[in-house]
Image (cartoon, coloured by chain):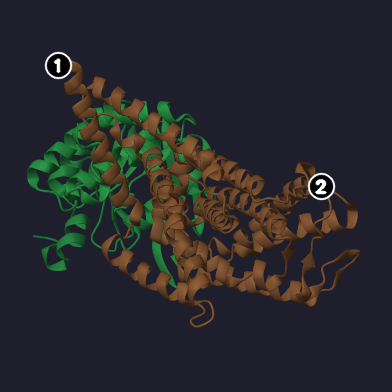
Amino acid sequence: MKILEVTDMVMKFGGLTAVDKLNLSIDQGEILGLIGPNGAGKSTAFNCIAGVHPPTQGRIVFNGQTINHQKPWNLCKKGLARTFQIVKPFAAKSVLYNVMVGAFATTDNTSKAEDKALAVLKTLNFEGRKDTKAGNLTIADRKRLEIARAVATEPKLLLLDEVMAGLRPAEVDEMVQIIQHLRQTGITVFVIEHIMRAIMALSDRIVVIHFGKKIAQGTPREVASNKNVIKAYLGDEYGIS
Amino acid sequence: MTGKEYSESGRTMALADKGFSHAGTGISLEKKILKDTMNKVFLALVAVLAFGLPLIVKSPTWLHMIILMYFYAYLTTSWNMVGGFAGVLPLGHAVFIGIGAYTSTILSLQYGISPWIGMILGGIISIFVGVLIGLPTFKMRGAYFALATIAFAEGFRVMVENIDYLGPLKINGPRGLQIPPLNTGLSNFMFTGKEPYYYIILIMLIAVLAVTWFISRSKLGYYLNAGGEEPEAAMALGINVSRAKLFAMAMSSFLTALAGTFYAQFSLFIHPKSIISLDTSFEIAFIALIGGRGSIAGPVLGALLLRPVSDLSRIYFGDTLPGLHLIIYGVVLILVMIYQPRGIQESLTKIYDTVVDRLADRLKKDGDA
């Protein structure tokens, strides 16, 4: 079953076409990677799906419902959560407080939200930091907090926007494990990532976009050997040899 | 004698603000229970002191000052729901004081309706006005929002100053309205002594603090804080930020209007310059910023610290240096912002916590021995 289907999505900012007729779909329980060179339109595509920008054209169907013009908070309640490339923690508050904000998406009761937040922190091996102020966390922990908050909203589909950028190799490995664990708990994951090693290990399928257009899709192995992809990343001269 | 009371009740609020962070810091359960008990005892002590104060303080001047102190603590606590939790800086709350004061006064002068009923009606009208201000302005960030609220408040004042009659209602423009002190008694919200006013504002203050405490622990409190700090992230986590802010604004407007009625009945004379003045709006913000925005204790501590400054400077320097209190506020604000950006409540809360912690340790040792 498809949990997300994007059909002919176009996003224009004035004269600039950031996303051009993008088609993609994600199966329930899948991990789909979205890669592309800088400025390819990956985050814009994410923002369209997450309701930040309503797309200029096209159709986005989530869980059988068209969600083109839904607001981000309603999408979150329907089970579509996201993280931000530039992390946005509630810096003055503790980690637990941050995660509780997410947990309130499915409950009105403070102690229930706290229990749920603690459970999420536990699955992410993050309990030890629960009383730390979010503003004092390292970058790796901030990224983990982004995920924890999003997971606390009990999503069906989780959009991860470069959660591994800026992490050390050991931290990347841990993050890969965390994401794989999330998939086991039944969450479908759609991930943008620049670190090839991570996305190759993680994804079931990968979609590559360049200047807003899809240029390739397939298993990690297929994508890595695709001519267009190599050209987009390395330039024309390397295209054929 | 009053000095003690100020600092004491200040610390209580600090304690109410703190309770949350105790959980799970690795202290033994026994000690935690002991500390909780101590906090409760302390709160009870402060309550007894606050309620017994008029028995000690007989001077009407002092009582008047303390009433105004509570009045400002109340106003700032109401303001804090928007200005503190929701992370915006409204600088036009005098509008709601004005609406509250005028509504109840006009109704009681012209139609003989009890100010208690007028108080609630004024609150309801304020909700509408508050939402009306909030709808277009909550989309603005930072200084723009503050400027918009100032503009609205000033516009409202000028309107009131230039209207003598609004349909059948006598507003009396810049001359204001005087309430003849004829029918005293609880149902008329009018008393000869100051003590009843003292108890009314004290109960109002306790009630508004309880509401704030409740909100800060509820979903709404979390949502306001989140939306105030990182609106985009908050929206992605399922929060309709504008709606949360409007809700806070509605509550804040309602509660502020109640204080307007109190002030009208307390001073028995209202006119636009005194009741819808920017000075009042600014003073509320000053108190909140110095006390600690977004905390429960902050507004109360701020009022306890700054109101005496304002009153005493008016008593002693009113003729020679009018407005001196604003200069002092400015200096205090600069110092606080440099050394205690979260307001004085932070350091006072820490001191209180340390004292309770040490006391608990000592009591426990004595108990064990």
The secondary structure type at the circle numbered 1 is loop
Up the image or down, A237 lies above or below B205; here it is below
Up the image or down, A178 lies above or below A143; here it is above
Q: What is the letter of the brown chain? A: B
Residue B97 placement, left or right of B356: right
The percent position of residue A147, horizontal first and vertical second, equals 29, 40
Residue B48 placement, left or right of B26: right
Instruction: Residue at 79% x, 65% y: name it.
Output: B178
Q: What is the letter of the green chain? A: A
Quarter of the image where one finds residue B162: bottom right
The percent position of residue A5, horizontal first and vertical second, equals 44, 41
Circle 1 is placed at which residue position? B369
Instruction: Name, please, the residue furthest toward the top.
Output: B368
Going by the numbered disc 1, the residue's amino acid type is Ala
Up the image or down, B149 lies above or below A24; here it is below
Instruction: Decide which of A213, A98 is in the foreground and name it.
Output: A98
The secondary structure type at the circle numbered 2 is loop
Residue B142 placement, left or right of A152: right
The percent position of residue B196, horizontal first and vertical second, equals 66, 45
Circle 2 is placed at which residue position? B114
Residue A99 placement, left or right of B5: left
Going by the numbered disc 2, the residue's amino acid type is Ser
